[in-house]
Image (cartoon, rainbow, N blue to C red):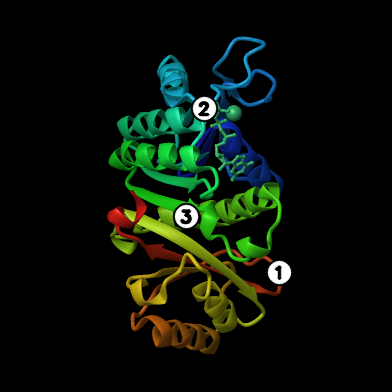
């Protein structure tokens, strides 16, 4: 896999591999999957046959991944930008994601972690996820956290698998958009270390932005320095209306990036800074 000038996404553990599988079905972004599940069909299997994951043991996930540092480093070495994704709270992804971030950083690549934190009813997994975040964020240049418990319409979602699917979709959206921004001035555009994300879709980008701003993970009064990624180019008047809609609710002028167009509607993703103490 040659990665000159490109970004690679590395999915760790069951959730990370599922997110990458979805990403592979909708984009040609280079990707690598790592799991400790011998039947998962991932690119790097860190376990002998007949082993089905680390059963929630993040220390085991970390120890297994430590044995694969050379292989992981080699596979991502050509990529100047790396997005590491995992559902925190299990064993494999929680243990391996920080190792991947460390491999990428020591290769001199820019690193963004895009991770999810389990819902409140997965209480012990949620605690484990939150306690694992500092290790990843110490190494990653930026960390984007999706709190699955804050996904819009969660109250009306009866099944956990639907919440997980919604999380996958949001993570995929955010990873594609982060990879767009990573080629530009990422660190000055996103000066805070931690972000969350909110997504809205509409033919009218201003309305899409308002939908995103009403998502529960977006508290508009804290949404200073919001980064806005729109998945198609905007006309000048559309851009002005969207910026006005965002300024009207946040009192801040957003950074706006436009990506490659995908259809008639405008998908608008906001990256919203969050404070570390709100996460940990
Ligand atoms: N986005 C997403 N999140 C998931 C998915 N499956 C599980 N999760 C979330 O991710 C957390 C970790 O689950 P897994 O990724 O299955 O765990 P793992 O890293 O494989 O760890 P072990 O199986 O214990 O070795 C769960 O607590 C869920 O909150 C998925 O398919 N997509
Ligand atoms: Mg697993």
Looking at the image, residue 10 sits to the left or right of residue 52; the answer is: left
Q: Earlier in the sequence, mark 1 or mark 2?
A: 2
Residue position marked by numbered label 1 in the rendering: 263
The N terminus - image quarter? top right
Towards the viewer: 91 or 228: 91
Please give the label number shown on residue 178.
3
Left or right side of 269 for 190: left
Q: Residue at x 49, y 38 (%)?
A: 125
The answer to whether mark 1 and mark 2 are in CB contact below 8 A is: no
Asked which secondary structure carries label 2, the reply is loop
Label 1 to label 3: alpha-carbon separation: 20 Å
What x and y, as percent, mark residue 148?
54, 53
Q: Measure how far apart labels 3 and 2 are at the Cα level.
A: 29 Å
**Where residue 14 appears, x then y in whole percent?**
60, 33
- Which residue is at a point 37% across and 72% down the rendered structure image? 223
Number of marks in the rendered image: 3
Looking at the image, can residue 191 be seen? yes
Q: Is mark 2 within 8 Å of ligand 1?
A: yes
Q: Quadrant of residue 109?
A: top left
Q: Is residue 279 left or right of residue 16?
A: left
Front residue of 51 and 73:
51
Q: Are marks 1 and 3 in contact (CB under 8 Å)?
A: no
**Upstream in the sequence, badge 3 or badge 2?**
2
**Residue linked to disc 2:** 56
**Sooner in the amino-acid sequence: mark 1 or mark 3:** 3
Residue at x 64% of width, y 53% of height: 163
Local SS, label 1: loop
Which quarter of the figure has residue 30? top right
Q: Residues within 10 Å of mark 2 (few under 14, many from 20)?
A: some
């Amino acid at each position: 896999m040659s990665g000159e000038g490109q970004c690679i996404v590395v999915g760790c553990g069951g959730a990370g591999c599922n997110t990458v599988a979805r990403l592979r079905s909708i984009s040609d972004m280079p990707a690598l999957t790592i799991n400790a599940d011998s039947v998962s069909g991932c690119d790097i299997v860190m376990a002998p046959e007949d082993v089905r994951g680390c059963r929630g043991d993040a220390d085991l996930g970390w120890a297994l991944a430590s044995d694969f540092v050379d292989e992981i480093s080699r596979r991502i070495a050509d990529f100047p930008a790396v997005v590491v994704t995992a559902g925190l709270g299990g064993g494999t992804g929680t243990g391996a994601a920080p190792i991947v971030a460390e491999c990428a950083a020591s290769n001199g690549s820019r690193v963004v972690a895009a991770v999810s934190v389990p819902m409140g009813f997965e209480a012990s997994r949620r605690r484990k996820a939150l306690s694992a975040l500092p290790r990843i964020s110490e190494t990653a240049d930026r960390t984007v956290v999706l709190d699955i418990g804050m996904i819009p319409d969660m109250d009306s979602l009866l099944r956990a698998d639907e919440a997980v699917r919604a999380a996958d979709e949001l993570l995929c959206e955010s990873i594609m958009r982060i990879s767009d921004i990573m080629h530009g001035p990422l660190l000055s555009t996103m000066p805070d270390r931690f972000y969350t994300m909110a997504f809205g879709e509409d033919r009218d980008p201003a309305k899409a932005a308002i939908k995103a701003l009403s998502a529960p993970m977006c508290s508009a009064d804290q949404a200073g320095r919001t980064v806005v990624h729109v998945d198609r180019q905007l006309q000048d008047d559309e851009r002005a209306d969207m910026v006005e809609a965002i300024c009207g609710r946040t009192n801040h002028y957003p950074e706006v990036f436009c990506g490659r167009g995908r259809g008639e509607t405008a998908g608008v993703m906001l990256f919203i800074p969050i404070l570390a103490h709100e996460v940990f």
